[in-house]
Amino acid sequence: MSTVLLQGLTKRFGTSIAVDSVNLAIEHGEFVVLVGPSGSGKTTCLRMIAGLETVSSGSIFIGDRDVANIHAKDRDVAMVFQSYALYPHMTVAQNLGFALKLREIPRDEIKRRVKDVAKILGITEELPRKPKTLSGGQQQRVALGRAIVRDPAVFLFDEPLSNLDAKLRVAMRVELVKLHHRLGATMIYVTHDQVEAMTMADRIVVMHEGLIQQIGAPLTVYDDPENVFVAGFIGSPTMNLLPGELNRRNDHLNFRTGDLELNLLHSYDAVISGSVTLGVRPEFLSIKPNNETATLDAKVEAVEHLGSETILELSTAGPPLTAKIARNDSVQHGDNIRIGIEHSKILAFNSSSGERLRV
Ligand code: ATP
């Protein structure tokens, strides 16, 4: 079984810690995406799994084998990088078959496997061509094909779509997900793009400063972030985060941020009072307040029409807010409007630790 188990995986470069005691159990056939901002330790983690980086401490199991001290070529993993790194003097077919040739696999077998992989990736016509005559998307398919042809226990991807233009990236995203279903292989994918993570992963691992912040299915991480970092990193437009003071007043809670006051009906326990950061996703703001919402006055500073949705950038007596509403052709820049925030969708975080406060 191609499970991957990371236990206390740590990488130090001099005195700085790039990966800090990472524990992660990946199931056979799972598509796991490591996502986080630049420098969060994703690539270093992947390179340690691949055997391209030594481990400072901790262990890496692939199946039941501890591979931490096994040479990269004996780990049964295949890595696809951002740069395609194809051999320019070889044809596509030769590029695809090269790793098999090195393993002295019989010629007929190589031919058959190359043909099969080319068919899966839709590059049969390109087999006799040299890489420089291919488009970026075709080159990336060849790079993918080189990994698939080896039939590895685990696929590792390091930002493989970053060099493609936006449209092709979306198309390749879908192809990779389909490929994953078809191959049923264990895949670990690194990206800084949270949209890629959300759309492709069975489970997302959010990293920040070498530490895992949260592990979960994409929608779980989106709906139920463990801390303010995850809340702000996952989702586009980003979650509105309002640092302020929460106080109980008779039958409701009063929240103050700058000169903005909100009366919240949410049944936060009295424990959740004092300095908190409230978080609310832009889609839970509306321009039609009702008795399910807290209300506030806002001024429309910018209107972005995305087609089916409209994004409003708002100024308030406190921090600015972003609202995502259904298409609206009438709201104009400069309008003064009443905004409603759904009480039940407001999350609270400890302002100093950033940890989620739960009712
Ligand atoms: P990016 O998306 O920019 O590659 P990342 O999340 O993959 O970011 P890493 O590349 O793993 O992050 O880097 C994590 C930290 O380790 C960074 O602070 C980086 O500067 C440091 N680092 C990575 N490789 C080395 C190295 N060979 N020597 C020294 N420091 C390194």
Image: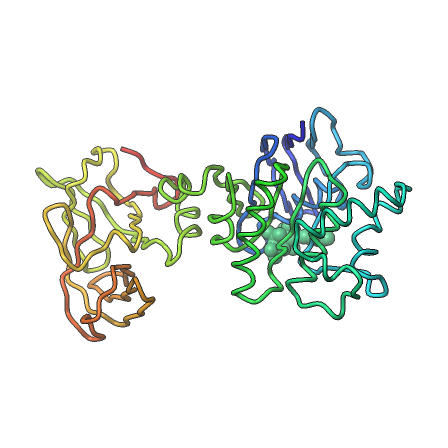
Residue 353 appears in the picture as rendered: no
Q: Identify the image's colour scheme: rainbow, by chain, secondary structure or one colour.
A: rainbow
Residue 65 at x, y percent in the picture: 74, 26
Q: Is residue 355 above or below residue 80?
A: above
Is 66 positioned to the left or the right of 289 in the image? right
Which quadrant: the C terminus? top left
Residue 73 appears in the picture as rendered: yes
Please count the marks in the image. 0
Q: Is residue 309 above or below residue 242?
A: below
Q: Residue at x 25, y 59 (%)?
A: 325
Q: Is residue 246 above or below residue 22?
A: below
Is 302 positioned to the left or the right of 206 in the image? left
Between 147 and 67, the one nearer to me in the picture: 147
- Extreme residue toward the top, this view: 64
Q: Residue at x 53, y 40 (%)?
A: 212
The answer to which image quadrant residue 100 occupies is top right
Between 275 and 162, the one nearer to me in the picture: 162
Which quadrant: the N terminus? top right
Is 104 positioned to the left or the right of 294 in the image? right
Q: Residue at x 83, y 48 (%)?
A: 111
The answer to which image quadrant residue 134 occupies is bottom right
Q: Residue at x 54, y 58 (%)?
A: 171
Is 136 positioned to the left or the right of 286 in the image? right
Residue 255 at x, y percent in the picture: 19, 48
Residue 18 at x, y percent in the picture: 64, 47
Between 318 and 219, the one nearer to me in the picture: 219
